[in-house]
Image (cartoon, rainbow, N blue to C red):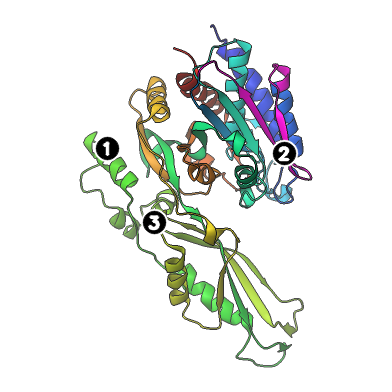
Amino acid sequence: MNIDWSELRHEAEGAFVRYLQIDSSNPPGRETPAAQFLGELLEKEGIVPEYIEIKDGRQAVFARLKSLANNRSLMLASHTDVVPARTEDWTVDPFGGEIIDGKIYGRGAVDMKSVTIFHLFCMILIKRFDIPLSRDLVFLSVPDEETGSRFGMKWLVDNRPDLFDCEFSLNEGASGLESFNSIPLDIFQVAVSEKRMAPFRLRVKGTPGHGSKPTVDNPIAHLVQACERLVNWTRELDVSEQNTVLVRTLTDKGLINGDFDFKKLREDGLMSPDMEAGLTNTINLTILNSGFKFNVIPGSAEALFDCRLLPEMDLGDWRAQVEAQIDDDRIVFSYALEEVPNEPDPIISEWDNELSVAIEHSVREFFEDAIVSQSTSTVGTDNRFLRTLGIPSYGFIPCLLSQSELNGFHANDEFLTQDNFKLGVELMWSVVAKVVCSK
């Protein structure tokens, strides 16, 4: 097999740009055009996709390349939806797929339309070159990941169990990084677990009245005070086994000294936001709602917080901590996603199996001195549903992301460099080929 990587990368980049130009914002959640686009690319190669209608306008796309062996499959999973983007906040069209100075701009560039294209071209290469397989390779791209997966992966796990006869699964969740807390080095993190998504709502009732009169029962004032207590709350660091192993590895290689102290880093203001997110239960105030007229004191107010909990954090214990920090019986706490209290405890996928070994070997073929480390994803992914099925599931974006690219997740002017896109195409293929192609 002789792959012309220059030509293939150019072809894949063209598909990526066109994919970025499809507005699959969620909400409102009309991802069917994105699923159809991916399916049509597969159909052109003679791969027959299945379009799964989950809800009006919300399709998943599934495809399988079969082997003659009896081994269970490798699933390449991704999501088609992206968070909304306000055109007026971007310096480029968020759905333009523009390439400027070596950067490919667009909502979903890193989260996660690029990874979907990496997955898809692994399928295309195997079909195009008629490569014999040692196990089935499965492609699945689903809607609704960005609002909790109720009409995406969760629905499929509940209603289409036949899709998930998998030995392993790859999705998003972690990536290669250019540095570790500002220390320059090539480090590739692979997410074997993830923080639990536990957004919560605070509600408070007060006494409505005329805005001209003094009052001690303005619900907005009560809510603001509660929010301030949470915003200024310094929570304890929790150094997981995965982080301990990483620090030990970096110390053994002489890249950091043996006195590396996470707590001192934070006290000295030297801890990156990404690192702190991996060591704490994070909360961010994202929505405030109250009032309808400037001269009317409203009868109620509410605030919503994005909250990500470390895997071992119990939901009941966390609620008690938040309520103790607020220390105000007028404030009513509730989780904002119905399914959060019922989700099982996060599961840690095993290490040192065929897929994780393939990732390690492939990374070091591209970057000889790279560090490959297990990690806990700071974001919620669809891997959480597959892990409950007993499928070892890993978060792996095969790119060496800069801080600017990392900052693009859910932010304005999201981009991926052309160099990283090229790396992603080849590195993802290297990993997948090691796991599914006959030796």
Q: Which residues are magenta?
A: 43-69
Mark toward the start of the polypeptide (1 vs 2): 2
In the displayed structure image, the side of residue 99 where residue 424 appears, left or right: left
- Tell me, yes or no, whether the highlighted magenta stretch contains residue 51: yes
Mark toward the start of the polypeptide (3 vs 1): 1
Mark linked to residue 312: 3
Q: Residue furthest right?
A: 56
User: Would you place residue 419 above or below residue 409 in this image?
Assistant: above
Counting from the top left corner in percent of width and height, residue 94 is at 70, 41
Instruction: Decide which of 286, 242 is in the foreground and name it.
Output: 242
Q: The disc labelled 1 sits on which kind of residue?
A: Thr
Residue that badge 1 annotates: 249
Quadrant containing the C terminus in the rendered view: top left
State the residue at coordinates (79%, 45%).
Answer: 56
Residue 93: quadrant of the picture: top right
Q: Secondary structure at mark 2?
A: loop
